[in-house]
Structures are given as C-alpha cells and as structure tokens.
Image: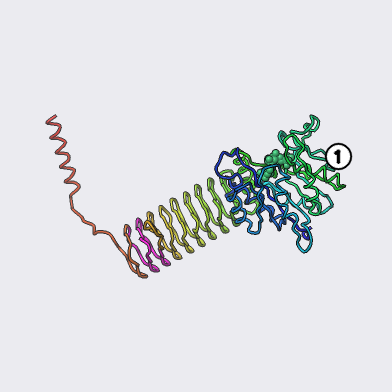
Amino acid sequence: MEQRTCLAIVLAAGEGTRMRSSLPKVLHAIGGRPLIAHVLSAAVEAGGADIAVVVGPGRDDVAVAARKLAPRAKVFEQRERLGTAHAVLAARVAIERKTDGKLADDILVMFADTPLVRPETLRLLRDALAKGAGVAVLGFTPKDPGGYGRLVMQGDELVSIREEKDASPAERAIGFCNGGLMALAGTHALTILDRIGNANSKGEYYLTDAVAIARDMGLKAVAIETEEDDVRGINTKAQLAETEAVLQSRLRGAAMDAGVTLVAPETVFLSSDTKLGRDVTIEPNVVFGPGVTVEDGAVIRSFSHLEGAHVGKGARVGPFARLRPGAKLGTDVHIGNFVEVKQATIEAGAKANHLAYIGDARVGEGANVGAGVITCNYDGTDKHRTDIGKGAFIGTNSSLVAPVTIGDRAYIGSGSVVTKDVPADALALERSEQVIKEGWAARLREVKELRKKKQKKTD
Ligand code: UD1
Ligand code: MG
C-alpha cells in the first residue's frame, strides 16, 4: 500500500455565499488554521504526495494560501461552476501526469470545506483501491439524510449514488448517504470522469455518477462507512462553530491521552498545532492560538492567552497572562498575572510575577522583573531591544527605555526611568529625591477643620 502513488484533488471552488463573508469560505479557520489547511494536511498524511487544488475564477487569495500551505500543490481554476465532476476535471493535467511513465495509482477527491476528515479514513479509501475497487466512497448514516446523495447498495457492493433531487421515493428512503469524498483508481479515472454527463435535475456534472459508470466498465465500487464528523461540511457560520466544537473535543481528547491534565477540558481552546508535553496542567479558561509549545510539567493557570510561544519545562504562566508571538520561556520561569510577553526570551528561573510588559527583550537567567515594569520598546516608528542580564533585579514600576542594556546582577531602583545602559553589579536610580516635611499633614487637617467651622457660622 505504501508503494502506491497518490494524487489528492482538493475542490475549493465553492462560492461560500451562505457564510455571508468577504473572506472565501475555505480560508475561514477552525483550530487556528484555515479549513483548507486541515484538508491539505490530511491529504499529505494519507500519502497524497501530489496535490492539486481547484479554485474558483479569480480566487488568487485561495491559490496563494494553498501554495503557502502545500508548496508543491498545483493550483487549477474552474472557470464555471458546473458540478463536482467538472471541478475534478479542471485538474485534468494533474490526473494525466505520469511519474516514471506511470499514472498515479490512487486519486483522492476531497472537499476543502470538509475539514475534519481524518488521514486514517482516507487511508481506508486507498486500501479499498489497493484491494481492487475502481471507485471507493465514504458512506455515513446522518440523523437527517436530507440533501445528501443516497448510496444504493447490493450486498456489500455499491451500485450507484443518487442525488436527492433525482432520487425516487424509494431511493430517498435510504439512510446510508454519500459523504462526498471519493477515491478513484488512477488508471481509470479519466475514462470514468470523461463519461460523466449532466442530464440531471441540476444540469451539473455529478462526480457521484462515477459509481454507475465504473460498474458499467466492469469495475467494482465500494462504500466505506465512517462517522458523520469525518464528512461534516461547512456552509454557514453556525456550521463553522459546530465543526470547531468537534475539532476542539478531538484535540482535548488527544492532549489528555498524551498525559496532559485539563482541569475543565470544555473551557480550554487549542489550536491544531498546539504541542503540550507530559504532566502539563492547564487550568480552566485558557486559549491557545497557533504555534504554541509547552514542555513537560509546566502549569498554565486560568484565563491565560498564548500564541506563537514556547513555554519551558516546569514553567508557570498566569493566571491572566498573555504570551504573544516570539515569547520564549525557559525552564522554571514564572510569568504571573497581567504580564504580557512578546518577542522576548525569558531565561531559566527568571520571574515577572505581576503587571509587566516585556517586549523585544531578553531577560537573563534568574532575573527578577518587578510589578509594573515596562520595556518601552517602541518609539513611534521603530522597535528597540532591551537586554536584562543574569540575576538582575528590576524594581517595581520601572520603565526601561530601549535600546538599553542592564548588566548581570544590576539593580534598578523602583520607579526609575532607565535611558542609559547599566553596568553589571551597579545600582541605577532615577527619581527625584524624597522631601520630608514634619507635621505638614497634621497642619493641613487643622486648617481644613477651621475652614469648615467658619463656613458653618456664616451659613
Ligand atoms: C455532494 C455530493 C453528495 C454528497 C454531498 C456530501 C455530488 C454531485 N454530490 O453534494 O452526493 O452527499 O456532497 O456533502 O458530488 N465544488 C466545486 N465546483 C463545482 C461544484 C462543487 O469546486 O462546480 C466543490 C464545492 O466547493 C464543495 C464540493 O465541491 O467543496 C461539494 O460541492 P457541493 O455543491 O457542496 O455538493 P453537494 O450538493 O453538497
Ligand atoms: Mg455540500
């Protein structure tokens, strides 16, 4: 099976009108990445070495996204939307292409708006081809079969697929439905596809007709039963949210299976690429945007938001922490409440426990960043770096005006606005000297009392 070659054709030419959005449907995201990205990665994981993406006319945005996600993907334009078989044939050049004089063994047709299909499900379709089927489709039994093509079975053989609009009452009574995705034997695919006509109620070229045509050619067609979630398609924002919920529950389950403690799983939002080590604990209400890795034993406390960040072993983050892209926390780092870290490396054992902004910076090993410390990284046009040495102590409410370097073990007095580099082991103090006026407050109160009494007399 692994020896067989595979071309995956991803149909992404849908208009997505029902999303009521200026963003193309397949670029909407679930699990922190576009729908089409889920489909492309399932295709690659299922062995789709060659990928063709079919986009609608003028959809350069989808083409650009597809190439970025799968650099080897070839993009084809379907100029008119004349049906699923017509869309597949937009990639004719890819289907005809021979590698070492040979057509692809397996052709997988996938829908870019059906993002939850699992690689193992696709492999079952490919297995069916390896066992000699000419066409293999995904079947499922939805609660409400309305709108789906019906699978007409004879024993364990698939005889035909009947689109609902063209089905007889008896065919409509069938509960076993077409999930849409399909695998075709590469050597027969073009012959089958070219024979598909559009004599049906919608006047479209239906990919589903491939089944009856294959059988007519003496080939075998089979249906592989799968869960509804695998073939869940997205047409509306409500379906986008439902699909996100299914994906989140898969991701949470996988995290827990891998040894992560989720105290209240249903309140934790993960991205498809979130990497969580063993014995990581995630408290309730934490959100992971794309690109986060958390190493073993770290604790992410409630109401934290992480994106593009690396959290080292045994580190503690939150509650109410925000790690933005480029935040790299070393082993045993503590980032506490209302601390924001962006493009900054916080080395092992360093702490910023409350109310701080650390951006475009390095915080050296074991350094302590006090409450209210701000790295002033932006001068209105450019970003500048702050470098804090090992074991340095940054007193509360200090502003570090970048570019600035604080030497190892240096000490910044609270409330300082630091604009010059501070040498190692030095103290930097920038604040006006404190003035003491003995008895001043008591005298103020006396004056105020006297004024009040006078006022009462005159009233
Ligand atoms: C299709 C199946 C139906 C199945 C259902 C599962 C056909 C004829 N019917 O119906 O049996 O039960 O999926 O959801 O295949 N597309 C193009 N170009 C086109 C037409 C479609 O790229 O000209 C793309 C769409 O963007 C979509 C996919 O193909 O991603 C499926 O098309 P859609 O119109 O949703 O087909 P269904 O009517 O849902
Ligand atoms: Mg559909």
Nearest the eye: 233 or 193: 193
Q: Is mark 1 within 8 Å of ligand 1?
A: no
Secondary structure of the residue carrying numbered label 1: strand
Q: Which residues are magenta?
A: 386-414
- Residue 375 visible in the picture: no
| Residue at numbered disc 1 | 154
Q: Is residue 296 left or right of residue 164?
A: left
Residue at image coords 52%, 57% = 309
Q: Residues within 10 Å of mark 1 (few under 14, many from 20)?
A: few
- Give residue 412's position: percent from left, percent from top: 34, 63
- Give residue 418's position: percent from left, percent from top: 33, 62
Asked if residue 387 lies in the magenta stretch, the reply is yes
Amino acid at the residue labelled 1: Gln
Nearest the eye: 450 or 195: 195
Figure quadrant of residue 196: top right
Task: Identify the coloring.
Answer: rainbow
Question: Is residue 268 placed above or below 411 in the rendered structure?
Answer: above
Q: How many marks?
A: 1
Asked if residue 62 lies in the magenta stretch, the reply is no
Question: Is residue 143 placed above or below 33 in the rendered structure?
Answer: above
Q: Is residue 87 left or right of residue 127?
A: left
List the single residue furthest toward the bottom.
424
List the single residue furthest toward the right.
218
Image quarter (top left, top right, bottom left or bottom right) of the N terminus: bottom right
Image quarter (top left, top right, bottom left or bottom right) of the C terminus: top left
- Give residue 209's position: percent from left, percent from top: 78, 42
